Image: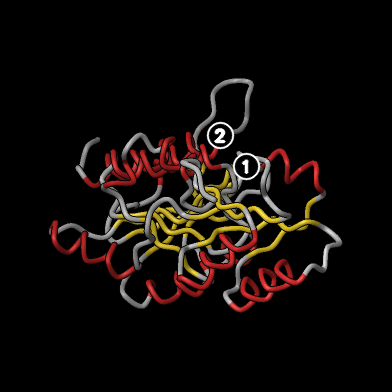
Amino acid sequence: MRDESGIIEGRNAVIEALRSGRTVERIFVLDGSHEGALETVKREAKKRGIRIDFADRSRLDNLSPSGAHQGVVAYVASFNYAEVEELLSKAEERGEPPFLIFLDGIEDPHNLGAIIRTANASGAHGVVIPKNRAAGLTAAVAKASAGALNYTGVARVTNLGRTMEELKEKGFWFVCADMQGESMYSLDLTGPIGLVIGAEGDGVSRLVREKCDFTASIPMKGEIDSLNASVAAGVLAYEIVRQREGRG
């Protein structure tokens, strides 16, 4: 069974979704159960590298729109993912140096949707997210993007760091958001660039940070010393826009 929120529930429905090649983001399975169909769900998910979370019955009841979950609830993508090469092709078609936004560990769907919206508004050619420990393209993300997902591609990769290394070979420079970094106004953010935004609280992970060429901070003038991830992405994205347009 599936509803408009991008949720599939029920043993047979989830197994069919997995075997059909649907993009399944995450699966919740009843903890402690070894019932045959649920074991099949686990096996099919493992083969495809899909994250499984074990939950008690009360949590599954809360996740299930109908209450008829049969011990399993799956989140599926509401939009298809793009390939990184497709994002680069968009830049080439526009005759612009590539500008991609990389997200490291953004798990809040509202933040992801807001960043996709910012990517579209700022002229970024796409967004890149990791396969694990991150929000995927659920209905909540689509709603938060306010339609931007119809125009801005999102690529999902197994390893952000490896993808960054491959793009460096194509001339990319990477800048990550870090409140301890250099002021964004002192950095050259023109040319082929990847803007890396980390999760709130944790920031950009060490392994991804090591792949970055620069760290950029946003000047803070008030008593609060940090910004929401989607707001930080917007501020830095528009500094890239400002520099590309050669203003001030």
Residue 95, percent from left and from top: 13, 59
Residue 197, percent from left and from top: 51, 49
**Quadrant in which residue 185 is drawn:** top left
Residue 219, percent from left and from top: 50, 33
Question: Residue at horizontal 46%, vertical 43%?
Answer: 139
User: How many neighbours does mark 1 have within 10 angstroms: few (below 14), some (14-19), or many (20 or more)?
Assistant: some
Q: Which mark is residue 200?
A: 1
Question: Residue at horizontal 28%, vertical 46%?
Answer: 150
In the rendered view, does 105 fall on the left or right side of 166? Answer: right
C-alpha separation, residue under disc 1 versus residue under disc 2? 7 Å
| Disc 2: which residue | 228
| Mark 1 touches mark 2? (CB < 8 Å) | yes
Q: Amino acid at mark 2?
A: Asn
Question: Residue at horizontal 67%, vertical 42%?
Answer: 63
Q: Amino acid at mark 1?
A: Glu
Q: Secondary structure at mark 2?
A: loop
**Quadrant in which residue 154 is drawn:** bottom left
User: How many neighbours does mark 2 have within 10 angstroms: few (below 14), some (14-19), or many (20 or more)?
Assistant: few
Residue at the extreme right of the image, as rendered: 32
Please say if 248 is above or below 105: above
Q: Earlier in the sequence, mark 1 or mark 2?
A: 1
